[in-house]
Image (spheres, rainbow, N blue to C red):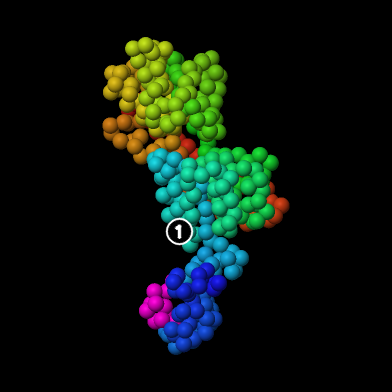
Amino acid sequence: MSEDGVSGKGGFVTSADVARHAGVSRSAVSRTFTPGASVSAAVREKVTKAAEELGYSVNRLARGLHANRSDLIAIVASNLAEPFIASQLDALSAALMERGQPTLLLNAGARDMSALMTLVLEYRVRAVIVLSGAPPTEIVEQCLKGRQRMILVNREAQGATVDIVRTQDIAGSRLAAEHLMSGGRRRLAVIRSGSETPTRLRRAAGFCDRLAEAGLTALEWAQGREDYDAGAMAARALLGPDGVAPDLEAAFCVTDRTALGFLNTARHELGVSVPDRLAVVGFDGIAEAAWASHGLSTVAQSIPDFVAAVVSILDTPRGEDARGQERLVPVELLRRGSS
């Protein structure tokens, strides 16, 4: 197999094909497409002309394997249609491409995590960024042994010295609690789906703890699988004709999608006046929250700061015995019409 990773017969055009077509050696082709390598102007012209005529492109993946170095960054994520995940992927992949680090996107919802992380090992990426799911400990250890950097976003790896980027979930949920209490709201609920991810649990706990400090208790509601539907279900269960909390004054939803489901159902299906009778606050800062039809108050995460945190870790050298890095992504409360 050539450095192009294919034979050239019935497959991709290889450097050997270009060399034959240009009447030069394969090493001359390699030097032509290697920045800074020495090659005469005449040979360079022959090679580039032959490459254009044959439609040849350098196989960066194969070249990286030959050099025992890859610029490929794997991103593991699920729920790719979720607005906040999509905005993270968009900003992060664009920033990495600007740095000359193309991305390999692996859908964590398509295969089990063990099989997915095995693919990461096989592709020999420079680093893997895990936005969704919890990689098995043994796979984490294999990545680290193979000198593949692993960055977990809002996730933990017990006993492993991985790098972590963490949103200020607890600080943000406390901001939401303080905002709602400052408006005189005393009968409050915290709402999330039944998906017990670390992020959702931290946000709910931070909100409840802040209320407890003020002598208040939050009604906790956690059902449903999909965030928007969970919010709609919660509105009907709490505020509907047979609702268990008809006097509810405020709701903190641990994601914006949940908050939008709650807000839209309360307003348009149940006829609840927002924010006069009921205040609603979400968390994430998705673009839809700012739409005039929603006007959702939210605890917003900074996407630019998230990207900067990942890039900072990638740029920090790490020895074999180094401890994992940790970066915090700041949040801020954006007050809008829902509260």
Q: Nearer the viewer, residue 169 or 161?
A: 161
Mark 1: amino acid = Met
Residue 40 position in % (x across, y down): 49, 86
- Label 1, secondary structure: give it: helix
Residue furthest front as drawn = 10
Measuring 37% from the left and 11% from the top, which residue is drawn there? 242
Question: Quick check: can you spot residue 192?
Answer: no
Q: State which quarter of the image contains the C terminus.
A: top left
Measuring 42% from the left and 31% from the top, which residue is drawn there? 227
Tell me: 253 left or right of 264: right
Image: 241 above or below 82: above
Residue 273 position in % (x across, y down): 30, 19
Q: Quadrant of residue 276?
A: top left
Tell me: 326 left or right of 98: right
Q: Nearer the viewer, residue 96 or 2?
A: 2
Q: Nearer the viewer, residue 221 or 108?
A: 108
Measuring 62% from the left and 42% from the top, which residue is drawn there? 136
Q: State which quarter of the image contains the N terminus.
A: bottom right
Span shown in magenta:
47-57
Question: Quick check: can you spot residue 142?
Answer: yes
Task: Report which residue position mark 1 lands on.
Answer: 97
